[in-house]
Amino acid sequence: MISRRSFLSLASASALAIPTRAWSRQSPRPAINAARLRNRLERLSTHGRPAGGTFADGVSRVAYSVADLTARAFMIDEIKSADIVPRIDAAGNIFARYGGQPNQPAILFGSHIDSVPNGGNFDGDLGTFSALEVIQAVQAAKIQTKHPIEMVLWAHEESTAFGIMTAASRIVAGDLQAGDMDRTWNGMKRSDAIKRLAGNPDQIETAIRGKGTWHSYVELHIEQGGTLDQARVPIGIVEGIVGLHRYEVVIEGVANHAGTTPMGERKDAMVAAAQLTLAVRDIAARRQGRQVGTVGQIAIEPNSPNVIPGKATLSVEFRDLSEPVIRALDDALKTRASEIAKETGTTIAFTLSSANVGVPTTSGIQAAIGRAASALSLQTRVLPSGAGHDAQQIARLCPMGMIFVPSVGGVSHSPKELTTWDDCERGANVLLGTVLDLDARDSV
Ligand code: HGY
Ligand code: MN
Ligand code: MN
């Protein structure tokens, strides 16, 4: 049994990259089981795999789908196989805690396993299953941590369902509005969707947790961009996570006969939607900086080739680390939209459907990640996250940090999403080292 004190004296010593013999003298450095992590991720990928497909064909495991439910059941079985007890909160998040002193706040770490349609096998999955590996590595090394260590599988992280991102971690952070449970999507009420996850919408406020519930939160995630891959750097230390404003935009024109209506007499919702889409691209692209703007969804009514579209419903989103920048993009688009409405004889209405605030990560956790990486002689790069994450919700409750590993070619939200198994192992071991480093500090 290695005491926490001797492990930490070694951990801090190893941060000076003392040769590994220091470890063999006392005990092997705790490490995750890379083969088991890979096996679990490969088994997870069968939940939502296209019929007749292979691992390379990715997954469609949209929140609340059958694939999401069977994947969650798989994770619960794996948690139980590690002799820890899964707990599902009223929002459908799955927690499992190990060790530590009962009077200490837990260190929380994890991610999500729901995917976008035709997504990849690493987005969220790596961080969730690495969290289980961290607990099992601590068990195997018989390390007695001071703080309980707690893994989490966040439900409903992706925006596909109900148009809301980080929907279940958002509730835990206290972001719960009247009427949220009555929103509908695909003919399903949000309260019924949560029941599918064994959540309890009638007691949904019991999922809300206060500041101080956790000591800290760390999330391992694939970068989903190309910075680390191009730089050949194995570990990213996230400096901040972008904010986002997402709107549902409804454009009302007049449906009419495509053959008999003269061009000058049309009120064509599709034309207005096309001009608005180009405006999103132009407004985001013309400023210096990392802001981005996307139209990802569009529905046309009546959607017949011989009818001038009478209605278009689009998703529009802007993202940036800075809230004032996002607001400036919003304002510029709304100004342009009123011009387009006039030019096309349509009406254009914006409804905010999802908003995430951009958040910096906690410098003390950035430093802990740096120490854990240098203990493994791994190079690091500090960078922002262009993707949103549950971590930015939990940042409202406790210190937060994120570890990135490279995405090959910077591709994500696609079956071509790929992180090498070696990078998965490195990321999971840095997560392990970070958790143990944080355990030595009563506050970060
Ligand atoms: O949309 C995002 O940024 C994340 O993948 N949910
Ligand atoms: Mn994603
Ligand atoms: Mn993700």
Image (cartoon, helix red, strand yellow):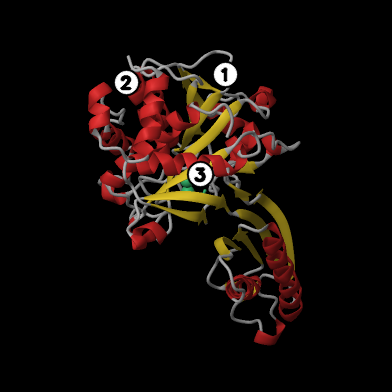
Quadrant where the image shows the C terminus: top right
In the rendered image, the vertical position of residue 96 relative to residue 395, given as above or below: above
Counting from the top left corner in percent of width and height, residue 30 is at 31, 28
Is disc 1 in contact with disc 2, using a CB cutoff of under 8 Å?
no
- Circle 1: residue type: Gln
Q: Residues within 10 Å of mark 2 (few under 14, many from 20)?
A: some
N-terminal label among 3 and 2: 2
Q: Is residue 308 left or right of residue 231?
A: right
Q: In whole angstroms, how far apart are the C-alphas of marks 3 and 2?
A: 25 Å
Counting from the top left corner in percent of width and height, residue 393 is at 61, 40
- Circle 2: residue type: Ala
N-terminal label among 1 and 2: 1
Question: For numbered disc 3, what is the local secondary structure?
Answer: helix
Which residue: 38% across, 39% down? 15
Q: Which residue is mark 2?
A: 141
| Res 171 quadrant in image | top right
Q: Nearer the viewer, residue 304 or 206?
A: 206
Q: Which mark is residue 104?
A: 1
Q: Nearer the viewer, residue 27 or 251?
A: 27
Q: Which residue is mark 3?
A: 366
Which residue: 66% across, 81% down? 261
